[in-house]
Amino acid sequence: MKTHTAYLTFATERRREFVRITEDVDRAVEESGVTEGMVLVSAMHITAGVWINDDEPGILEDTLEWLDKLAPPSWAPPANETARELSPDPGDFRHHRGGEDNGDAHWKNLLVHHQVIVPITGGKLDLGPWQAIFYAEFDGGRSKRLVMKVMGE
Amino acid sequence: MKTHTAYLTFATERRREFVRITEDVDRAVEESGVTEGMVLVSAMHITAGVWINDDEPGILEDTLEWLDKLAPPSWAPPANETARELSPDPGDFRHHRGGEDNGDAHWKNLLVHHQVIVPITGGKLDLGPWQAIFYAEFDGGRSKRLVMKVMGE
Amino acid sequence: MKTHTAYLTFATERRREFVRITEDVDRAVEESGVTEGMVLVSAMHITAGVWINDDEPGILEDTLEWLDKLAPPSWAPPANETARELSPDPGDFRHHRGGEDNGDAHWKNLLVHHQVIVPITGGKLDLGPWQAIFYAEFDGGRSKRLVMKVMGE
């Protein structure tokens, strides 16, 4: 059995952003020498996620807009009445009492989930034809990490 | 250490459908000879998911209706005002500029998540009494794949 | 290769509750003797979840309030118009025809996801500085189980 651990660091310019990392995960698998197994790709922060989806700018933009309605930030006016009603009832996040303003990013972490596992078959990521791996930043502008853990033989 | 890889192919008649696959996963584990380990069950498409929940028709129907409100299709009228407000602000998905009409299925993939891992203990899927495994199709009517990767000893 | 399986049992007093389990997962890893690998932490019920997030009471309270809007219970009045519109259209969950009243807990299970995998590096849980592991109970008041499966070397 082999294991291999690698980390990525992100410091996105924008507060929210999808960053393609398929090739980084590929590299970690290659370094590991594992040909049959799995690689866990997991954000180490509570305001970020990992999503496997389409590398098509339209759907990524659609998704950021939609996540701001389902999990509305309180540092911007709500997008519409539904976003207003999904906002915290005290008027702002209880979480913000300590001086934070990123409550919405915690909720986006919940919706997107912070990790995926990719199977490794014949030395390659066993992904479908349109599956790309994205790090999803919801509270960027500072240094954040992600862990890749490869396990197999 | 042993690994085993198996694939399932789906071509649902309906556009959206939950398909029970507990027995298929069971079979893959049996074929693998693994008695202690894990099996990853992962949709290979960006418009499908995998959900572990109750094999009870009512909750599955409730869930499809609810997902159409949270992640509204643009090929049908919105279910109500909330669904309308959760729809993309440009009037349609930016993703549809390329001729697609399945943006909602990408969002349902995000909500449901595209994969689960089931522990294997004593040669059996270590599931709770009501946990059944479902492939969740959100853009069916064509051939789609799912991978099962068994790993253990 | 080593594997180790441990279970936790919960019987929360409240119907909904986040229960911190980081230390329980830590203990299972220590018992396993695994220093490089992964631990799967998975609720064995269809009305519970596992969330890795911030051990800060404000965000946990915010999140329970928000989940009640996105996945509204039918045993309480809806929080507002959005929650009412996200409720099942037949007036109540189809799932409740059999006498249940926990349809909302199935939906919360979907949103939160019922499992996480934590990498193990150098004999320790390889978590980020603010990542704590929570069992998320959405239909408590009775005995429920969670499985931890450790795998590695």
Image: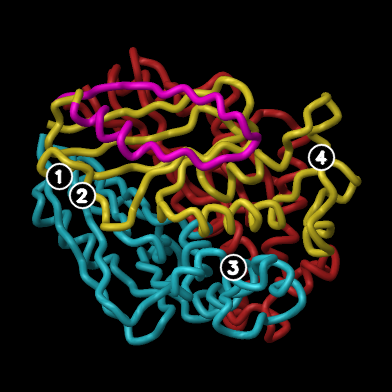
Chain colours: A yellow, B cyan, C red
Callout in the foreground (2, 4): 4
Residue B63 lies left or right of residue B87; in this view the side is left
Q: Is residue C108 above or below residue A45?
A: below
Marks 2 and 4 belong to one chain: no
Q: From the image, which quarter does the C terminus of chain A lie in?
A: top left
Helix, strand or loop status at disc 1: strand
- State the separation of the CA atoms marked 2 and 3: 30 Å
Q: Which residue is mark 4?
A: A75
Marks 1 and 4 belong to one chain: yes
On what subunit does the disc labeled 1 rest? A
Q: Earlier in the sequence, mark 1 or mark 4?
A: 4
| Residue type, mark 1 in image | Thr
- State the separation of the CA atoms marked 2 and 4: 43 Å
- State the separation of the CA atoms marked 4 and 3: 24 Å
- Quadrant of the image occupied by residue A150: top left
* Residue farthest to the right, as pictured: A91
Q: Residue at x 77, y 51 (%)?
A: C65
On what subunit does the disc labeled 4 rest? A
On what subunit does the disc labeled 2 rest? B
Q: Residue B90, how many percent across, how many down?
A: 67, 67
Q: Residues within 10 Å of mark 4 (few under 14, many from 20)?
A: few
Q: Which residue is mark 3?
A: B71
- Quadrant of the image occupied by residue C68: bottom right
Callout in the foreground (1, 4): 4
Helix, strand or loop status at disc 4: loop
Residue A121: which numbered mark, if any? Answer: 1
Q: Which residue is mark 2?
A: B149
